[in-house]
Image (cartoon, helix red, strand yellow):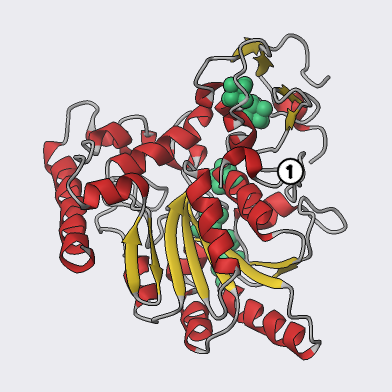
């Protein structure tokens, strides 16, 4: 399919200060685009993230918020 | 195993055609983490064949053989025999099919492979419909659910695949759900270590098929287990053990959540709530689920 980041309507944004490193977002992301960072927190590959919002819905400490995309998504 | 200890390797690559919020890719990511690189996957016609993409592209970082809709288990049996002849005994053969390809059209090939004691793992990802072709009913579709071929709601109850599988008395079979990744991972890992035929079924709630919004995939699986619509269990050498919340429900330690909680967020049950509540059909499904649990209690406590 290619760069599926352009599908996104909402962008999941991680607050790494709030993140408790549980990795629920990582395990449940259907695309496997949640990256595990060295400090144990996570970041998201926006080139491919489809914006489904599962990561935000499953994060128990609300460290991920969905922000409406402006423009045509992608990077 | 704890989530943080799951292997970091990814075998499902980003950029696939899967719908946003797809449960099949969640399931496959976890399954392939458990099985590892030395796996050959046999995929019949289903969403996964589309997610896989068209040759020469692929979304999967392992070898895959595509085969006709009805033939996943037969194809896997052939691959297993070939690997055995070649002396490659360290490769896991995985047949990966939808519920249409398992409950319905692929049942004969599956039963044959189980009876012949083929050394493979058969996984059915059960989204309770033929989703790839546009949401037609299958033998796994629940009573009263809308599909494009059951417009007023399905009239029949779902088939109990677990019972059919157990009638083959294979060394290992299990039911799990994407919402419980450790349960899923551990069951696949266990199956990998056992010789002979293994069957695992994963409940995979599908947003476009069940008509719920895409961030709710995991929640819908959790509610399926909490309401008892789906049970987590495994069967090793004919001994059945229930797992997690399903075990607590079996032993009457917790009560099932009313199935309405699972049905309400799903557009495929909307006609049971709008314009007015169809108490009769909701009750019929609830009673059907209760009957299943009564049977479980009779046989498996
Ligand atoms: C013999 C045959 N009949 C019909 C089809 C069309 N077909 C392709 S996939 C599919 C449905 C697959 O449903 P399921 O196995 O539940 O997998 P899902 O699409 O839900 O992932 C159908 C009917 C086919 N490919 N071959
Ligand atoms: S789910 Fe939330 S807390 Fe857990 S790793 Fe992801 S962002 Fe961090
Ligand atoms: S929005 Fe969906 S695809 Fe994007 S990172 Fe979150 S779970 Fe993954
Ligand atoms: S229809 Fe359902 S199972 Fe198929 S790709 Fe879409 S979300 Fe996944």
Check the image and name the residue furthest to the right: B56
Q: Is residue A55 above or below residue B186?
A: above
Crowdedness of circle 1 by 10 Å Cα count: few (<14), some, many (20+)?
few
Q: Residue at x 32, y 44 (%)?
A: B245
Indicate the quadrant where residue B300 lies.
Answer: bottom left
Residue A33 is left or right of residue B164, and the answer is: right
Indicate the quadrant where residue A75 lies.
Answer: top right
Residue A62 seen in render: yes
Q: Residue at x 62, y 63 (%)?
A: B45
Residue B139 is left or right of residue B109, and the answer is: left
Q: Residue at x 33, y 53 (%)?
A: B231
Q: Nearer the viewer, residue B186 or B23?
A: B186
- Expressed as whole percent of the image width and height from the top left, the position of residue B26 reads 60, 44
Chain ID, mark 1: B
Q: Residue at x 73, y 73 (%)?
A: B91
- Expressed as whole percent of the image width and height from the top left, the position of residue A61 reads 52, 16
According to the image, label 1 marks what residue? B8
Q: Is residue B234 above or below residue B210?
A: below
The quadrant of the picture occupied by the C terminus of chain B is bottom left
- Expressed as whole percent of the image width and height from the top left, the position of residue B152 reads 28, 45
- Expressed as whole percent of the image width and height from the top left, the position of residue B21 reads 58, 35
Q: Nearer the viewer, residue B262 or B244?
A: B244
Q: Is residue B116 above or below residue B2?
A: below
Indicate the quadrant where residue B120 lies.
Answer: bottom right
Look at the numbered disc 1 and say if its residue's Cβ is closer than 8 Å to ligand 2.
Answer: no
Provide the secondary structure element on which disc 1 rests.
loop
Residue B136 seen in render: no
Q: Nearer the viewer, residue B220 or B18?
A: B220
Q: Quadrant of ligand 4?
A: top right
């Amino acid at each position: 399919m290619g760069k599926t980041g352009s599908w996104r309507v909402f962008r999941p944004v991680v607050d790494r200060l709030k993140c408790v490193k549980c990795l629920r977002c990582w395990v449940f992301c259907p695309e496997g685009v949640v990256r595990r960072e060295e400090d144990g927190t996570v970041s998201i590959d926006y080139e491919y993230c489809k914006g489904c919002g599962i990561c935000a819905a499953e994060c128990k400490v609300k460290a991920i918020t969905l922000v409406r995309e402006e423009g045509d998504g992608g990077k | 195993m704890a989530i943080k200890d799951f292997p970091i390797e990814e075998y499902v690559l980003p950029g696939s055609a899967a719908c946003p919020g797809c449960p099949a890719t969640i399931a496959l990511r976890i399954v392939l983490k458990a099985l590892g690189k030395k796996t050959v996957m046999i995929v019949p016609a289903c969403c996964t064949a589309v997610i896989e993409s068209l040759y020469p592209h692929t979304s999967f970082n392992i070898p895959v053989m595509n085969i006709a809709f009805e033939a996943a288990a037969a194809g896997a049996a052939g691959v297993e025999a070939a690997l055995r002849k070649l002396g490659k005994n360290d490769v896991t053969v995985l047949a990966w099919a939808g519920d249409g390809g398992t409950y319905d059209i692929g049942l004969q090939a599956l039963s044959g492979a189980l009876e012949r004691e083929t050394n493979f793992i058969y996984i059915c990802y059960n989204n309770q419909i033929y989703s790839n072709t546009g949401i037609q009913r299958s033998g796994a579709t629940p009573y009263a659910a809308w599909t494009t071929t059951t417009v007023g709601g399905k009239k029949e109850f779902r088939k109990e695949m677990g019972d059919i599988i157990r009638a083959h008395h294979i060394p290992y079979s299990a039911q799990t759900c994407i919402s419980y990744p450790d349960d899923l991972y551990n069951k696949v890992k266990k199956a990998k270590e056992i010789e002979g035929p293994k069957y695992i079924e994963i409940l995979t709630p599908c947003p476009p098929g069940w008509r719920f919004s895409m961030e709710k995939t995991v929640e819908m699986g959790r509610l399926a287990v909490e309401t008892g619509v789906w049970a987590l269990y495994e069967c090793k050498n004919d001994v059945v053990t229930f797992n997690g919340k399903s075990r607590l429900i079996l032993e009457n330690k917790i009560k099932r959540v009313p199935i309405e909680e699972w049905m309400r967020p799903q557009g495929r049950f909307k006609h049971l709530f709008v314009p007015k509540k169809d108490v009769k059909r909701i009750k019929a499904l609830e009673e059907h689920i209760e009957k299943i649990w009564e049977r479980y209690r009779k046989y498996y406590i």
